[in-house]
Amino acid sequence: MPKFQNMKTIVVLVVFVFISFQLIANNGISLPGKNANALAIPVPQLGTATNFVLFTVNGAVGNTGVSSITGNVGANIGAITGFGGLNGTIYNNDPVTAQAVTDLMAATNQLNAIPSTATHLPILGNGETLYTGVYSMPGAGSAAGALTLDAQGDPNAEFIFQIGGAFTTGAGTTVVLINGASASNVYWVAQGAIAMAASTTMMGTLIANNAAISMGAGGILDGRMFSTTGAVSVYGDVISIPVSGFIWIGAISTNWNTGANWRSGVVPASTDDSFIGVNLPFIYFPNVPASSGTVSVGSIAFGTMGGAGIRGCCECRQYFKCNGGNHLPK
């Protein structure tokens, strides 16, 4: 009889452990140590749509207010209005947009078909940290507060969000990338409208399937806004195509050698490409203290708002050594 009771105890423990792991997955919590290679997540292929920051297959693309947009803007069918001072090219109903339609539809289908690694509750953020994976939400979804995407040191880590309905963000929502995470590897696909509220800071490529997509006033997007059928609307926002390499954000100081001043949380090494001025309203621009000696990097490039950064670097350019081509001002 005691043996039989022990067997029942073992069975109960096994079932309990299995259910616990299922609950972890269903709440969108990735287990430690997962990475893109282990999960074998296919790399989404945007094709020529990669060059667009705002694009719709069928609908209007419009800007209201003073926005800073870096990247091409396009509509295969529909009007494009309000983009004075665009740092890119406007394409409207031409062979370029026709090809972008083909590529965007293929990418949307690919993203929808990738098997999910976790089913997430409808609400993202509020201090949550997620690791590489494909997160599925069966219905409408939303984000609020802070959502951190942690690549755990893998620069190829992918984050894909498959949303079964509309997707919204609350005012002031912030998506934070750490430990090598890149906006180039973040994708949001909603089977409905995407509406980002005022002052949202978003990362990655967002696709509204058969619906409109918009970003409220004061928003920041390092990524893209796409619609397969619907309007694309921005309102006094700062939006740019994701930039690869190490991106200066100047979060806490002007010190080049402080990891927290770089989006990845890591200071670029001698073979890395660095980017300063990614079209964001930075307060701090990099400075290399004389006591640090020479900083060696692969290259340094400046974005459209790099003017202040260039002036700052003029004072310390003697401390930079670029191995892959010197982009510093003369």
Image (spheres, grey):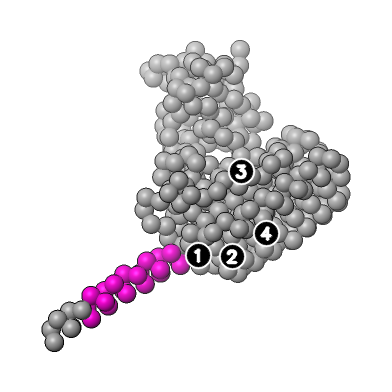
Residue type at mark 1 is His
Q: Secondary structure at mark 4?
A: strand
Q: Secondary structure at mark 1?
A: loop
* Towards the viewer: 280 or 133: 133
**Mark 1: few, some, or many residues within 10 Å (few <14, many ≥20)?**
many
Residue type at mark 3 is Asp
Residue on which disc 2 sits: 141
Where 82 falls versus 296 (above or below)?
A: below
**Mark 4: few, some, or many residues within 10 Å (few <14, many ≥20)?**
many
Where 60 falls versus 307 (above or below)?
A: below
Q: Give the residues in magenta.
A: 8-27
The quadrant of the picture occupied by the C terminus is: top right
- The answer to whether marks 2 and 1 mark residues whose Cβ atoms lie closer than 8 Å is yes
- The answer to whether marks 4 and 2 mark residues whose Cβ atoms lie closer than 8 Å is no
Q: Earlier in the sequence, mark 1 or mark 4?
A: 1
Q: Earlier in the sequence, mark 2 or mark 3?
A: 2
Q: Is residue 264 visible?
A: yes
Q: Name the residue located 17 percent from the left edge and 79 percent from the top edge.
A: 6
Q: Secondary structure at mark 2?
A: strand
Residue on which disc 3 sits: 222
Residue on which disc 1 sits: 120
Please say whether residue 20 is one of the residues in the magenta stretch: yes
Residue 194 marker: 4
Q: Name the residue located 58 percent from the left edge and 42 percent from the top edge.
A: 184
Q: Name the residue located 52 percent from the left edge and 56 percent from the top edge.
A: 134
Q: Would you say 126 lies left or right of 161 here?
A: left
Where 213 falls versus 66 (above or below)?
A: below
Q: What is the CA distance from the residue labelled 2 to the residue labelled 1?
A: 9 Å
* Towards the viewer: 131 or 319: 131
Residue type at mark 2 is Gly
Q: Would you say 261 lies left or right of 87 here?
A: left
